[in-house]
Image (cartoon, rainbow, N blue to C red):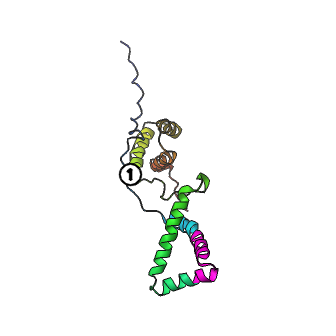
Amino acid sequence: MTSASPPPPSPPSLPGTPSQPPAPRRKAPSLQAVLWLLLLGLPVLLIGLVVMTGSVGNAAALLFVSVVCTAGIGGVFWLALALLIGWMLNLILPGPLRRPLTLPATGSDPVVTRLTTYAGRARQQGMAPERIRQDLARAGWNPVQIEAALADSRPADSHPTETQP
């Protein structure tokens, strides 16, 4: 009787395909996204006011009076209108100029958590990070989610540590 070597460990099963993850919770826009929308909307709003009132002085007077006479409530209205205009412009801008309104996926995302668990188990079984990356990409996962999962699943000894003097 010959002894057969045990089969190599199989990689953990891939988490659900990208078409099956749970519906993500809607996140509030980041401060950077809000500032981007204001940067887009304020100039358009101001140009529109100048065109409608006939001069820069009239537009400035309208803004000043509407803010001062309403104890600041007019300013909230104008900023909200500028955000709305910026949001509409962000929708119609060509791809390279468009900005995402939410942050990329992080470890708190349930999908990334599942991918992190998969990557951690695969690394424990000796699978190379490049192979994990390829398997997840072939399964259709987003590169941002893949990189977040690989970064979160990094073994403790590979994290940079400070050297003691």
- Dot 1: within a 10 Å radius of its alpha carbon, few (fewer than 14), some, or many (20 or more) residues? few
User: Where residue 144 sits in the image (x, y, percent)?
Assistant: 50, 48
Please, what secondary structure does the residue beneath circle 1 have? loop
Main secondary structure type of the part rendered in magenta: helix
Residue in the picture at 47% in, 71% down:
80
Residue at the disc numbered 1 = 24
User: Where residue 56 sits in the image (x, y, percent)?
Assistant: 63, 80
**Can residue 32 be seen here?**
no
Residue in the picture at 40% in, 54% down:
108
From the image, which quarter does the C terminus lie in?
A: bottom right
Residue farthest to the top, as pictured: 1
Image position of 158 with respect to 41: above or below: above
| Near-viewer residue (151 or 136) | 136
Image position of 64 with respect to 22: above or below: below
User: Where residue 121 sits in the image (x, y, percent)?
Assistant: 40, 40
**Numbered label tally:** 1
**Can residue 27 be seen here?**
yes
Residue farthest to the bottom, as pictured: 69
In magenta stretch: residue 85: no
From the image, which quarter does the N terminus lie in?
A: top left
| Near-viewer residue (137 or 75) | 75
Residue in the picture at 37% in, 55% down:
25
Image position of 25 with respect to 136: above or below: below
Q: Identity of the amino acid at label 1?
A: Pro
User: Where residue 106 sits in the image (x, y, percent)?
Assistant: 45, 54
Residue in the picture at 38% in, 51% down:
24
The part of the image, by quadrant, that contains residue 10 is: top left
Magenta segment: 42-60
Left or right of 48? Residue 1 is: left
